[in-house]
Amino acid sequence: MKKLLVIAIIAFIAMAGSASAYNAAIWNEAGTASAPNPIVIKPGQTLTFSYHGMGFAAENQTLPYFTDVVAVGGGAAASDMTVVVSNTNFEPGTADPATDVGVIQVTLNASAPVTGQWRVTIGAGQDAVSKDVGSAARNFLIPEFPTIALPVAAILGLAFFFQRRKEE
């Protein structure tokens, strides 16, 4: 029975995934609260955000920023959107959490489709955060089936397994 419990705990930890060095988030321009997901933007508009991180493994780190834009629907193209981070590096220093206030600018070209949808990824070092960006929240994609079904199936499978063991 102890072996079974240990295996179940290991399986649960494996399903949870591995932790990264710190947790990244995109916050509003003032750096006071999390940015919405999805972010709604109009063609020709520029929005400003902050980069927030907490749980740093070491102090006085210098983490280079990187960005990526992927078109996900509605006739969008990656070239429709520009993401500029005004600082080269995220430097949390000794502060935890740390926020780089107002450094991210997301611009949607005036000629971009009004039904376009994009996924913007912004990161520093090895950690990144993605946000859905588009013209209307109702147009965004739902999570993929395995994202929902696999954890539910695993829990039901464990419950069934333990019930069978209890009957024996």
Image (cartoon, helix red, strand yellow):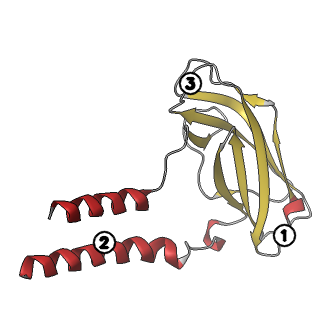
Label 2 and label 3: CA atoms lie apart by: 36 Å
Camera-side residue: 90 or 138? 90
The residue identified by callout 1 is 113
The image shows residue 156 at horizontal and vertical percentages of 28, 77
Marks 1,3: beta carbons within 8 A: no
* Placement of the N terminus among the 4 image quadrants: bottom left
Residue 88 image label: none
Question: Which mark identifies residue 155?
Answer: 2
Mark 1–mark 3 Cα distance, whole angstroms, equals 43 Å
Q: Which residue is mark 3?
A: 58
Which quadrant of the figure has residue 12?
Answer: bottom left
Q: Which amino acid does the dot numbered 3 rest on?
A: Ala
Residue 139 left/right relative to 41:
left
**Of the residues under marks 1 and 3, which one precedes in the sequence?**
3
Return the x and y of residue 21 as percentages of the image width and height.
55, 38
Label 1 Cα crowd, 10 Å radius (few <14 / some 14-19 / many 20+): some
